[in-house]
Amino acid sequence: MQTDRSFDYVIIGGGSAGSVLAARLSEDPATRVCLIEAGGRGDSWLVRTPAGALTMVPGWGKINNWAFHTVPQAGMNGRRGYQPRGRCLGGSSAINAMLYVRGQRQDYDHWADLGNEGWDWDSVLPYFKRAESNVWGEDEHHGAQGPLQVSDQRNPRPVTRAFLAAAHNQQIPQRRDFNTGDNEGAGLYQVTQFHDAERQGERCSSAAGYLHPVMNTRPNLTVLTRARARRIVMQGTRATGVEIRQGRRLFRLSARRDVIVSAGAFGSPQLLMLSGIGPGSALSALGIKVVHDLPGVGENLQDHLDVTLGFTSRDTNTYGLSAKGLGHLWGQLRRWRRDGGGMIASPFAEGAAFVKSDPGVARADLQLHFVIARVEKHARKIRPGHGFSCHLCVLRPKSRGRVFLTSADPMADPGIDPAFLSSPEDLELMVKGARLTRRILMDPALAPYRDQELFGVHDQMSDADWQTHIRTHADTIYHPVGTCKMGQDDMAVVDAGLKVHGVDGLRVVDASIMPTLVSGNTNAPTIMIAEKAAQIIRDSA
């Protein structure tokens, strides 16, 4: 097989991190960059329209979505979990709820305490700010000149305001800004959404913010879509290129400086293992030649397990299936096309709360997403009528899982085992959180919107009843990380410069490098990781 073309950097995966890297590294016209993405361009009306997520996240037809599944989960009564992941330029930032959340200062300080110099909160804050064009303008916490537009929600629903009033009644402090390093409190999420006059109300994925504006104007940047990386080409223990399949064509691209893997918490460890980098005995058992025995590849999988509570409602000013609701939605679509506002611009998860499970806890350890719809099985089950839901997750779970190869076929899905609820502490904390969430939903402030309670939840539930409910209904809220973790211990995969231990010319840049899960949503931190990585790479060139 002949090498097709040569570049300075070949980036595998055009998602939240890869789009940032391609745009930033190609700012130098003397640097040749190639970005490889298995999906499409990520610029269709489904992606641009925030409400389009409803058609992509459930995974029917795998529209811009890998739509993975886990292996059966013992902690979830043997159920297989569902794992949507973006498959287009922009990755999961093209199909998510657009929520802009950084986590807590202590998350990043802990990374530094683990031996990752330069990843503490004070060191990463400039990269959050560099990425951001916040509608609030520039201040000590926010940037105003970055490619990623961050907006306030334009028209949150009245039921969301009632949720915030209910949280306040339950002694949860109000918070305007969740991104100062301390996120305790209840308020409205900010969103990755355009606020400029030309595109206001549209989704601002990482591709829309960083990549689409430059990908057709920079001669030193090549973007290949519908192209699947099969393996990293190695010469000894040096990465020199990537083997690609695009349609029926199989070819290689060479990288003079670095191959950069940005295929996400599932795809990055899978590609490393397919290339002979990973746990040696497991690779040998599949007939894969071991290039470098690196036992941590695929280990340390962490994710936010989520359980949903909710009610039906007679309020049709929400997403729901009814004649009146559909008529209302048509009017809302026309409004969105006119001025970028209304319900079509909603992130669905409008209300936020970061709360302590107990007053004695040092910092918030639970997160709530209040959703203006009746949500069941990731919107894969649609029932008539309207309602509202509240998602609950444990912010820093103890359970650890893994990603593994199911075969040596690069086209096969990876094996995904989050080992949800394998730690008893996670289940105990979820029970506390479920009780707290229900207290908020039962508050008088939400009385005008409540009708019938969903999922069999009732007043007299014991802890055992709640545990059964959680094991029966819980699933991911889409924050997998950690499978190529950064660190210096025996199970670390990359160092603080995101270079793969024991391999030259190879880096991993995406959510898989997080040693521990951040206390919140993971898209903004992933974009920050790519911004910081781009600077590290430029400085080392």
Image (cartoon, rainbow, N blue to C red):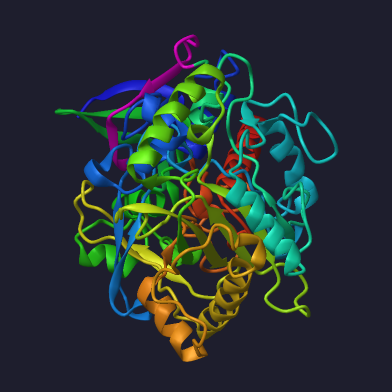
Query: Where's residue 335, x and y in %?
Result: 50, 23
Q: Is residue 242 magenta?
A: no
Query: Where's residue 65, x and y in %?
Result: 33, 42
Residue 423 versus residue 314: which sits nearer the camera?
314
Residue 375 versus residue 263: which sits nearer the camera?
375
Highlighted magenta segment, given as a residue range: 215-235
User: Where 68 sits versus 7, above or below?
Assistant: below
Q: Which corner quadrant of the image does residue 28 belong to?
A: top right
Query: Where's residue 144, x and y in %?
Result: 75, 27
Residue 217 versus residue 466: which sits nearer the camera?
466
Residue 500 in view (yes/no) = no
User: Where 41 sits versus 501, above or below?
Assistant: above
Residue 523 versus residue 319: which sits nearer the camera?
319
Residue 290 appears left or right of 431: left
Residue 282 in view (yes/no) = yes
User: Where 155 sits versus 449, above or below?
Assistant: above
Residue shown at the point (31%, 35%) measured from the top left: 38
